[in-house]
Amino acid sequence: MIKIVKRDQPSRAIFFFTPVLAIFLTLVAGGLIFFILGFKPFEALKFFFIVPIADKYGFSELLLKATPLCLIAIGLSFCFKSNNWNIGAEGQLTFGAIVSGGVALLFYEQEGFYILPIVILAGAIGGMLYASIPAILKTYFNTNEILVSLMLVYVSKLILDYLVVGPWSNPEGFNFPETRQFSDSAKLPLLFEGLRIHAGIFLALAAVVISWFVFYKTYLGFQMKVSGFSLKTAKYAGYKGKKMIILVFLISGACAGLAGVGEITGPIGQLHREISPDYGFTAIIVAFLGRLHPVGIIFASLVVAITYLGAETAQIFMQIPKYTGQVFQGMILFFLLASDYLLFFKIKFIGSKK
Amino acid sequence: MHKFFIRSFVSSLVLLFTFTVAAIAKDVKAAFVYIGPTGDHGWTYQHDVGRKAVEAAGFKTTYVEGVPESADAERVLRQLANSGHDVIFTTSFGYMNPTNKVAKEFPNVKFEHATGYKREHPNVSTYAARFYEGRTILGTIAGTMTKSNVIGYVASFPIPEVIRGINSFTLAAQKVNPNIKTKIVWAFTWYDPGKEAEAAKALIDQGADVIAQHTDSTAIVQIAEKAGVYAFGQASDMDKFAPKAVLTSVENNWGPYYVDRVKAVANGTWSQKDTWHGIGDGMVVISDLDSQMPADLRSKVKKLQADLASGKVHSFTGPIYDQKGNLMVAEGKTADDGMLAGMMTYVKGVEGDIPK
């Protein structure tokens, strides 16, 4: 007989085990889906998860893809840890990219070492400004940050549309919706000849280290943790909740803005309508899969990044529909949430009494 | 003896040559990069119909669908170039810069970019279709069939391609009915059934009884069917989605071009070109004309189609005036390709301003 018993305390071992379980279950379910679709499951999984990163170039593409996901997820973990549901990282990424792209265009055909730092800073500020809207509305007007931050995503995309179609469009570009290409001084330097991996990865790594320090070594980190467990306790303890809410949103916005900078000044090199394949939303999966832990997020961003690459490889070599990549991302989140049940409940196998 | 050797040598050379050519021809692999899903029944669907024609001609093909125009496009292109594909068709404008970037790294792979204007390397060609010729036909039908004299037009982005379509449509409609007005709604999307449906509803509310579209989904013809107004299919024959509303469709027929270009790669005769084909070359195809159209209109359209194909009629024949009444094309003249490629002003009879 199977009995489900509530745990006295959430199990810490299972806390870090469930993401692994979720990935395993995703692989099993994915193999099953491939089988039902008429593909050889192991071969399909090989093309999905191994072939894309089997060489140096593939691995560099994995890092390139994981960089924005990691950066945004680190930022989001500040919000999520403290019970602030910032769903609008995609908007903060877009707005950061708009501000930094605007600055980069100001320096069109100019060279100088000082240009890139200004462009990067502008992106972080843009992301912060945009994240401050839901933060201020939440703290002073009690609005729901989920709705506000999500709706602002669409606003930011419309602003970007307007700019690249209208005032910022390339004057030599026959009115197509794109800006000029940025000058080399406004672009992040490439790390290796022939690979697309760029200096933006250091921004992500720096974010990982700083966030680890803040979470576990500072008073702010402690406040965030307490607020995350119980807002009432935080109030009793006399924490200035408003300040903290605004601060975590600003950090989160800065990270998303920097991710936007990395895309446009890295592999894209200009502004156009599609600068991000929804990194801001996918990073939510990354943050939870990584258990809001800086090191966990690094691994989670690599796992999720490979679902993007794998979907392309699987279509090129096996004609598997590319949208299975999104199915995989969805399954990871689904299995993670489902297996979180084990955090609070345990399954007991009891021998039948005679 | 001597002669025998020479003969056998020559004949074996010939044999070898024939085998090699045959082997090369079979070995050429073509890849296609799509912006949307192959089942969109619009832009991507038609490119995939073209790809199937290449398969039917005996070549191997690969495709990748739903490739965003973000940093991902470059990786997909490089992977295709790296995995033994000899010619790669990139079928959306946003792939222009990645196409040229990757083409530089793979000088032995041929790249064919649809609807762009950059050919920075000798292994990059561009191709597009003269869809405005199809729109001349639609304009003629719309101008004849409208009763309210208000024609709706759902547009995507204010680029020359779309402005040209609006103009050629309006000019043709005015020719058969000088009182018509073309009302535009900009959807700012190529494919978004929700937005397109909203735009169509707005136009019907403003009194439009014929709706034309320069977006790719079937939403607009379905809205028209419900509202009891006429519409035209875009990219593929959309008659089955709205049998009463759809009078005809302008189909994008890429197959012949694709087969031609892949064969050229196989024969080693491929060279850089900028292709802009219309009804005459079969890249733009008019679907069956609906029986709701009067017989004389149908025969008129058939004749117009033949005249556009032969070059006897040009969609932009003067006198053409812009909205302010300035002469754009003088009487008896036709607009040249340069003017068409950069067309960014409305002709007289179009309502509203081009979004800036």
Image: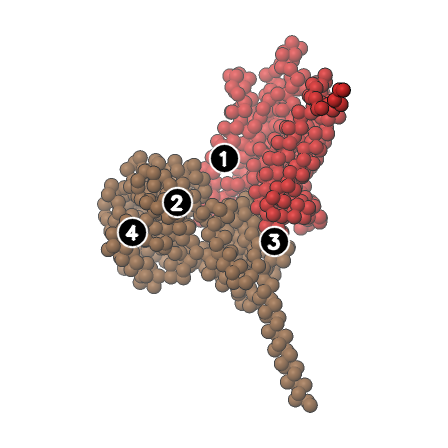
Chain colours: A red, B brown
Q: Which one is earlier in the sequence, the residue at label 4 or at label 2?
A: 2
Front disc: 3 or 2: 2
Determine the residue positioned at 43% across, 45% down: B216
Q: Chain of mark 3?
A: B
Query: Quick check: marks 2 and 1 in contact, CB under 8 Å?
Result: no
Q: Which residue is mark 2?
A: B241
Q: Share a chain, discs 1 and 3?
A: no
Q: CA distance from mark 4 to mark 2?
A: 16 Å
Circle 4 sits on which residue?
A: B291
Tell me what residue is drawn at x 30 percent, y 41 percent.
Answer: B229
Label 2 amino acid? Phe
Chain ID, mark 2: B
In what element is the residue under mark 4?
loop
Q: Quadrant of residue B332?
A: bottom left
A171 sits to left or right of A200: left
Secondary structure of the residue carrying numbered label 1: helix
Q: Which callout, 4 or 1, points to the residue nearer the camera?
A: 4
Q: Tell me whether circle 3 and circle 2 mark residues in contact (CB < 8 Å).
A: no
Q: Quadrant of residue A346?
A: top right
Marks 4, 1 in one chain: no
What residue is pinned by disc 3? Answer: B80
Q: Amino acid at mark 1?
A: Lys
